[in-house]
Image: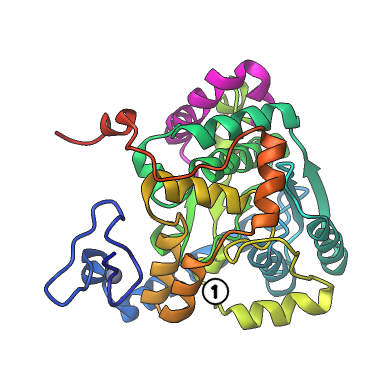
Amino acid sequence: MTTCIRCILPETFPGITFDQDGVCNFCLAFRGQERLDAERERMREKFEQLVDEVRGLSTYDALMCYSGGKDSSYTLSLLRKQLDLKVLAVTLDNGFIPDQTYINIRKVCDALCVDHLLVKPRFDVLRRIFAAASERTLYPRKTLERASTICTSCIAFVKFGALRLSIEKEIPIVCYGWSPGQAPTVSSVFKHNPAMLRSMQRTLYDPMHEIVGDDIRPYFLEQKHFNDPSKFPHNASPLAFYEYDEDKILEEITPMGWRRPKGLDANSSNCLLNSYANLVHKRQFGFNPYVWEMANMVRTSQVDRRSALDRITSEEESSTLGSVVERLGVTIPLARQEEDPALQADKPG
Ligand SMILES: [Zn+2]
């Protein structure tokens, strides 16, 4: 398998080409660290200005999508300690949260004096969606370059659930703990556009609605939420423009009582389903769904190439896989499947 000599993207990644030295087109298109730093500075200013504008206008200044993982724990700490915001932390419980993560959430929220809300959708609904997502690719190919079908389904619940809550509670900013490799800097602070959201929601909602019907309505936006566009919040991914250093993140959250849960793969610090989701994606597409994120971080020297490669090629946690398969009522996929013909439909030509 050919892998870019500069980042870690493999030849199986959609749209990749290599020059004669073995450098991929994504690395060649990278505009350089200096421009990225300037962009980050611009977004940080934009975010801090927004924060000053909305502070105190509502009961909460920000809603934090809080998974309990290390990055979102650190983001929550930034919002509280550095920016002194009133934050409502919201966790979506997908049925695969490790016991240690519940403890981490409680400890971090207590240490930071944050109100916390746990949203736990019916497991029978989630189970049917995850089981379907492990058998076929539910969404357009483009959405699956950066996350597995299972992750994309789960994140749809997180995103639209957070939007729904923020509109209903009139919270002006929704924050995410996306790493700088996951959140493009240029779009790390923006105001939500209702028309665009409606079409984004449809792309994700419709395939899930086909599986479980109206049972997913409570977690997404309904017509009433679209009636007043002025209530749509801003979206921010602070780790895209504040310093991101894994050692410093652990230094910050460990004294609050945060501990890494056991039974997780190297790419997640909060979800037991992740290993299985990665395995399914690798068998379907031939690349790890975290490779895009890690390649971005290698390019910007936020992770060194060796450890990024180790992380991408590490084995799934077999003990965790067994229990996931049992709870979802699915099987472990054995070999890379033939490309789903449905995926060809959205390709040009
Ligand atoms: Zn590359």
Q: Report the front residue among 300 and 152.
A: 152
Most common secondary structure along the magenta stretch: helix
For residue 205: magenta? yes
Q: Is residue 336 left or right of residue 47?
A: left
Residue found at x 21% / y 65%: 25
Q: Which stretch did the figure color magenta?
A: 192-219
Residue found at x 70% / y 55%: 319
Disc 1 beta carbon < 8 A from ligand 1?
A: no
For residue 89: magenta? no
Q: Is residue 77 left or right of residue 204?
A: right
- Up/down of 137 relative to 56, above or below: above
User: Which part of the image, by quadrant, shows the C terminus?
Assistant: top left
> Is residue 220 in view from this perspective?
yes
- On the rendering, which quadrant does ligand 1 occupy? bottom left
Q: Position of residue 3 (x, y in %)?
A: 29, 69
- Up/down of 227 relative to 51, above or below: above
Three-letter code for the amino acid on which mark 1 is drawn:
Tyr
Q: Position of residue 310 (x, y in %)?
A: 49, 73
* Helix, strand or loop status at disc 1: loop
> Is residue 165 in view from this perspective?
no
Instruction: State the image quarter where residue 118 is shown.
Output: top right
Labels in figure, total? 1
Residue furthest out toward the front: 334
Residue found at x 43% / y 47%: 283
The residue tagged 1 is 242
Instruction: State the image quarter where residue 339 is shown.
Output: top left
